[in-house]
Image (cartoon, helix red, strand yellow):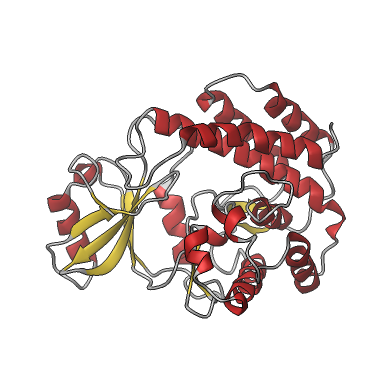
Amino acid sequence: MVEASSDVINAERVTSWISQQADVEGPFSYHLIAGGRSNMTFTVEQDGQTLFVLRRPPMGTLLPSAHDMAREHRLMDALRDSDVPVPEMIGLCQDETVNGRDFYVMRFVDGIVVRDIEIASAMSISVRRTMSESLIENLVALHRVNIDDVGLGDLAKRSGYIERQVKRWTGQWENSRTRDLPIVDAVASALLARMPEPNPTTIAHGDYRLSNCMVNSQGLVTAVLDWELCTLGEPMADLGGLLGYWYDPQETEPTGDSESTGLPGFLSQDEMAALYAEAMGVDMGSINYYRAFAQWRLACIAEGVYARYLGGQQGQQDEEIDLERMKNSVTERAERAAQLLNMN
């Protein structure tokens, strides 16, 4: 991991702030956790032990409504007594004199983030199956949370989720795109024209996937992470998003979650969807629509990430970033969305 530079983390001021919030006095050291594609995540360490995790926005100019630290903090804090495993929140700092931008700190959860095939390959077939099942169980738990009981009833509008999402991500696409890709606009129009009847509104994580969860050695999910895109909305969109990152035999060069979940033991997309449908009692007839929505939205997100890397906004990383692969993934996801919508 890369030690945080002073322009990213003001170690003296941030350490003083954490010491006031937590039961531990500094000094602390801060190291960037590689692999983050949006907000920046750092370990907070003392004497070689990781005590906390800090999240802050990327450097440079930010897109409107993106990278909302207060929202992430509010969501995880609201779920602290639910059946959804989340880290314990230490505090949210919105005083820009401390570190220039909002950030929050949570207590460190010991576990494994399966962010690549090397990590997944070291696990047994039975553990991979358990991970598949646990991911669905925790997604079901999230979608069963009563939004009013946990104080999130006013988080967002309770209707018009797909329309709002298409509008939001179309705007993000326009603000961050580095080239013209007419298929992205064509898929957006098709999504609006072909919307199925919505399911009852739930908390929608917005980026629920294997590498955004922490698991233990048995494969059970111990913490759901990265709540930046969470809102109130369509639960099937979360399922579609999970499947959008899952192994797809039609994908020519799988990376990340889609490569890892092709290993023996992981359930297939259809098996994952069937588990969810049985637990939630929903009809899977519209699943390809939500798979398409997920692919289109991921194309828009990937373009934003690609643009930020080109602009040097993600800080120094200790992993090699294949920018050309990242760029090509935008087109591939948009084309996959069109295929799922039978636009071709």
Residue shown at 73% from the left, 65% from the top: 272
Residue 219 coordinates in the image, percent (x, y): 54, 76
Residue 163 coordinates in the image, percent (x, y): 71, 38
Is residue 17 placed above or below 107 in the rendered structure? above
Nearer-the-camera pick, 226 or 252: 252
Nearer-the-camera pick, 80 or 303: 303
Q: Quadrant location of the C terminus?
A: top right
Determine which quarter of the picture holds residue 90.
bottom left
Is residue 133 placed above or below 299 in the rendered structure? below
Drawn side of residue 280 relative to residue 324, left or right: right
Is residue 211 placed above or below 112 in the rendered structure? above
Residue 126 coordinates in the image, percent (x, y): 61, 79
- Number of marks: 0
Q: Quadrant location of the N terminus?
A: bottom left
Determine which quarter of the picture holds residue 331.
top right
Is residue 127 placed above or below 283 in the rendered structure? below
Residue shown at 63% from the left, 30% from the top: 170
Nearer-the-camera pick, 143 or 42: 42
Drawn side of residue 340 relative to residue 185, left or right: right
Residue shown at 19% from the left, 53% from the top: 14
